[in-house]
């Protein structure tokens, strides 16, 4: 007959072994989760990345009104912005940091989302990397753009502000083909098309509006941006 004390000692050892094995397994697995590309950047690093990776857009419309907005460089010759920033233009000017204003070579607009692709000759920009995933509710992000809410619509220059993802809502009520996210900080006039970056400085979305009932910024998530870029596009009507 088995000694009960021997059985208890054996079970205790097995329990200790199980805990140690689990701990060892965690040691092996945990480092693979801490990828180098998710190391948070400082506020100064984020501001520098936005400065060299965004442009200011001015679009003179057929009715002679002037649209101001922000663009995100994804290559040295391609900028993303909102379709409503481009509008129906006579002339579109693209201003990069400390460089002459340039004119686009082609402009195309998404058939479904508030997104436009502006191509130009190589610009002195450093493209912003696209994040692999949309941000999660509660995640801390950075909101940026060129507000034109000064006296007589004057520019205040580039603004980079911390924000938090509130949640996702149905974009179809806002003429967008999918879920859009809300931020707890309001974008201002001229920040349409501006980037939303995660803590690692990657593009997780683009501003397209403000929800009047809450004051939350409305943002096209990066997954929607990727989809819109590969779907057929149209040329905006021009004068």
Image (cartoon, rainbow, N blue to C red):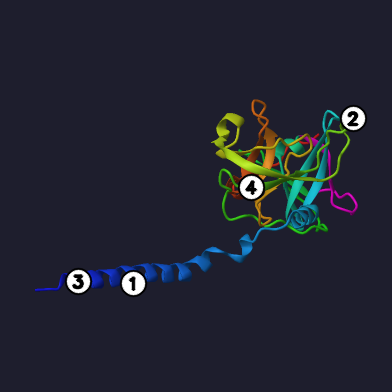
Name the quadrant of the N terminus.
bottom left
Res. 126 visible in picture: yes
Q: Quadrant of residue 151?
A: top right
Give the residue number, with chain letter if any, for mark 2.
152
Sequence order check: which comes first, mark 4 or mark 2?
4
Residue stretch in magenta: 88-105
Measured Cα–Cα span from mark 4 to mark 3: 55 Å
The residue lying at 80 percent from left, 49 percent from top is 55
| Percent of width and height locating residue 17 | 34, 72
| Foreground tag (4 vs 2) | 4
- Residue in the foreground of this view, choosing between 179 and 120: 179
Give the residue number, with chain letter if any, for mark 3.
5
Could you tell me what secondary structure mostly forms the magenta stretch? loop
Compared to 26, does 48 lie above or below?
above
Name the quadrant of the C terminus.
top right
Give the residue number, with chain letter if any, for mark 1.
17
């Amino acid at each position: 007959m088995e000694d009960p004390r021997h059985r208890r000692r054996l079970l205790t050892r097995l329990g200790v072994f199980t805990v140690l094995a689990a701990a060892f397994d965690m040691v092996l697995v945990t480092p693979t989760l801490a990828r180098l590309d998710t190391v948070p950047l400082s506020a100064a690093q984020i501001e520098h990345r936005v400065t060299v990776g965004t442009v200011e857009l001015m679009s003179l419309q057929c009715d002679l009104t002037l649209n101001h907005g922000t663009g995100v460089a994804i290559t040295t010759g391609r900028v993303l912005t909102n379709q409503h920033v481009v509008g129906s233009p006579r002339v579109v000017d693209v201003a990069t940091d400390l460089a002459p204003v340039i004119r686009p070579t082609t402009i195309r607009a998404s058939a479904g989302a508030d997104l436009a692709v502006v191509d130009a000759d190589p610009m002195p920009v450093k493209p912003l990397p696209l994040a692999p995933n949309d941000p999660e509710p509660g995640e801390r992000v950075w909101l940026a753009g060129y507000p034109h809410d000064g006296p007589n619509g004057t520019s205040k220059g580039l603004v980079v502000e911390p924000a938090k993802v509130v949640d996702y809502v149905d974009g179809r009520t806002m003429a967008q083909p999918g879920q859009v996210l809300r931020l707890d900080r309001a974008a201002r006039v001229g920040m349409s098309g501006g980037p939303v970056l995660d803590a690692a400085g990657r593009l997780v979305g683009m501003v397209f509006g403000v929800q009047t009932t809450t004051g939350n910024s409305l943002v096209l998530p990066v997954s929607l941006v990727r989809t819109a870029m590969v779907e057929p596009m149209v040329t905006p009507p021009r004068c």
